[in-house]
Amino acid sequence: MSLDDSGYSGLVLEKLSLSKIQVGDTISITKDGEEFTGVLMPRSQVGSDAVHIIIKLDSGYNIGLRLNQESTIHRIKGGARKRTTKVEEFMEKKNLPRVSILSTGGTIASKVDYRTGAVNPALSAQDLYDTVPELRNYANVHAKVIMSVLSENILPADWTKIAHSVASEIKTGTDGVVIAHGTDTLGFTSAALSFALQNLPVPVVLVGSQRSSDRPSSDAAMNLIGAVNLATKADAAEVMVLMHAETGDSFLHAHRGTRVRKLHTSRRDAFQSVNEYPLFKINEVDVQELYPPIQRRNPERKIKLKPKFEEKVALVKTFPGIEGILVENLIDSEYRGIVIEGTGLGHTPDSLQQSIKKAIDAGIIVIMTSQCIFGRTDMNVYRSGVELLDIGVVSCEDMLPETALVKLMWVLANSKDSATAKDLLLTPLAGEIDMRSEEPDYIKGLGES
């Protein structure tokens, strides 16, 4: 790799250039009287830091050093120079399916910033392939970068952009699409694409990783390979999320895009299907169907793209002592929809009802979900639920709060009036509503000794 593509700048680039050093060379760095020897590594191109350099020690660990004007760098020996070849030049194999990998950022597409120790979305889609060369054994990979952002910064407008990119890839005849995405909002994006990408002919698989590729316990490579396998082999044509199914490395689960939630902050099996079973089990070789998909793969099917989302929609979690002013501020801000994450079967404190009625009278659609992880709303059981129904709150059955938020954004952007929006909201479109909620085996076993 030349210094032009190394990620270095300023003082470090000046010293490297002076000594004619390239990435991969073994070098000696003298700094504040100490000497460090190792292989020069590239810098992740995040920020404008110009004084840090990264080397790989003989132990295999990478370290970052802050240089100053007095620091010296000497080249000990050159590294092996590899001829670079574009992925498309050596990836194409006649007997392999074609898969499109679209990168949006996140831990699965990240490098460590050695100045701060933070993990930043700095890899290109090309880097994803270089990091997991085994992919060439599974598919002809065509990679593109859509964006490079941490998933907490994803906006509804980004869902639209991703949907357009997926549709474009499908129209080129790809056998499946894989989207590399951060895990924090993976469930929101998978729900959004489930509504925006209709009549899919091939699978669309969102994949992330809980631990970055620089860590020994990383799940990035296994997840990415599994996602490619799922996208090319599964007899399904819907949006799915593919992640580790348990803490080890034995198999993965594919979850319906509208039924999946991140249930743990850091475990590799953080993602679970809620009120439904996983759709597929994936290991290094096999893709096993566990639960029927909504529709089967059919390359002749023509995709329908409906990628618009209304951003003036809020998710409000009720809590003891909540004040109605929170809802009334949304009225004043001209919001068009409010998702209430109520308690139990779908309740709010009585003190909130007047503000909710004001919102409904102002033309805002107000819908009810539950804070409970599993189960469904039933607002006909207790008085408070019945009263909310009477003033016009819409019960969302067993829809996840995140999915309900995204769907309300979508129906408001794709409906002519409130009545049409409400009908569409309660119409199952992507497996987001089921009149009989499933209770997976791992939930049934929670009460057993």
Image (spheres, helix red, strand yellow):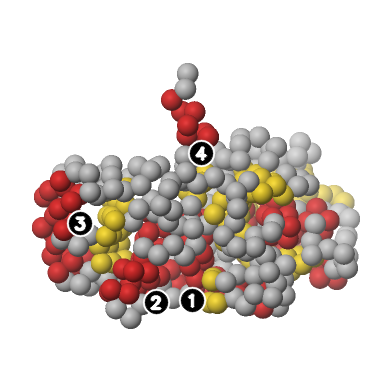
Kind of residue sitting beneath label 4: Pro
Q: Position of residue 4 (x, y in %)?
A: 72, 69
Labels 2 & 1 near each other (Cβ < 8 A)? yes
From the viewer's side, name the closer residue of 385 and 151.
385
Res. 305 visible in picture: yes
From the viewer's side, name the closer residue of 68 and 311.
311
Residue under pointer 2: 414
Labels 4 & 1 near each other (Cβ < 8 A)? no
Secondary structure under the numbered disc 4 in the rendered image: loop
Residue under pointer 3: 389
Crowd band around label 2 with a 10 angstrom C-alpha radius: few (<14), some (14–19), many (20+): some
* Label 2 or label 4, whichever comes before in sequence order: 2
| Quarter-of-image position of residue 281 | top right
Crowd band around label 4 with a 10 angstrom C-alpha radius: few (<14), some (14–19), many (20+): some
Q: Distance between the residues labelled 2 and 4?
A: 33 Å
Res. 165 visible in picture: no
* Label 2 or label 1, whichever comes before in sequence order: 1
Task: Give the left or right position of residue 248, taking residue 192 as reference.
Answer: right
Q: Which of marks 4 and 1 is in front?
A: 4
Secondary structure under the numbered disc 1 in the rendered image: loop
* Label 4 or label 3, whichever comes before in sequence order: 3
* Label 2 or label 3, whichever comes before in sequence order: 3
Task: Give the left or right position of residue 397, taking residue 296 as reference.
Answer: left
Residue under pointer 1: 306
Query: In the image as oriented, which residue stretches furthest toward the bottom?
Result: 416
